[in-house]
Image (cartoon, helix red, strand yellow):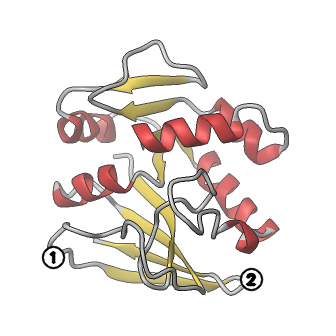
Amino acid sequence: MRKLKAGGFMTLDGVFQDPGGFGELDGGGWALPYFSDAARDDAIAGIEASDLFLCGRVTYELLSTAWSGNEGEYADRLREIPKLVASRTLRGPLTWNASVLDGDVPEAVAELKVLPGKDIVMYGSGTLLRTLLRHGLVDEVAVGVHPLVLGEGKRLFDGIGRADLTLVDVAKGDTGVATLIYRP
């Protein structure tokens, strides 16, 4: 059975909104000064261990705009991996090697997990992550906690209710980011 491995960035106060500086939030782009070669290598490894990238509409729109024209190993891997975009509003065909996943998303993801193949990777996509956690479909959550407090912005786990997780690994990056890996 394939595993769904989710990852993302958040501040020490739990804000995950606008880490790349896309104009969603004053102070957006907060993750960029902390991005390192090691973080890039970890992201590449996550994509290479997967054969499907799952994301929500907002993450798709932000990443496809930011990365579709970039060069380099990470940009190449991100461009090449097939993507499914969970959305109630987008209609295909999409660019950037992506297709729309509409309808009952938890049911569709459950069906994808039993198909043969590598893992499914998901970056960002807070709303989708919360939905899939509530349905017991996420096998691993890796959160890069950045050493700053914003004081405002959307928080990653707002509204999810209780979710008991087990810490399986901690890695301290050279820029002060602590990557915490949890499993349900």
Of residue 60 and residue 97, the one placed in the foreground of this image is 60
Look at the image and tell me whether residue 130 can be seen. yes
Q: Position of residue 71 (x, y in %)?
A: 84, 38
Mark 2 closeness class: few <14, some 14–19, many ≥20 residues within 10 Å = some
Residue located 39% across and 83% down the image: 167
Residue 172 sits above or below residue 124 on the image: below
What amino acid is labelled 1 in the image?
Answer: Arg
Q: In the figure, is residue 95 to the left or right of 84?
A: right
Q: Tally the numbered discs.
A: 2
Residue 162 disc label? 1
Residue located 17% across and 59% down the image: 134
What amino acid is labelled 2 in the image?
Answer: Thr
Q: Position of residue 25 (x, y in %)?
A: 51, 61
Mark 1 and mark 2 lie on one chain; the one further toward the N terminus is 1
In which quadrant of the rendered image does the C terminus lie? bottom left
Residue 146 sits above or below residue 109 on the image: below
Q: In the figure, is residue 133 to the left or right of 122?
A: left
Residue 4 sits above or below residue 117 on the image: below
Q: Position of residue 160 (x, y in %)?
A: 20, 67
Residue located 42% across and 75% down the image: 152
Mark 1 closeness class: few <14, some 14–19, many ≥20 residues within 10 Å = few
Helix, strand or loop at label 2? It is loop
Quarter residue 63 falls in: top right
Look at the image and tell me whether residue 52 can be seen. no
Residue 10 disc label? none
Mark 2, residue position: 175
Extreme residue toward the top, this view: 93
Extreme residue toward the right, this view: 72
Q: CA distance from mark 1 to mark 2?
A: 31 Å
Q: In the figure, is residue 182 to the left or right of 7?
A: left
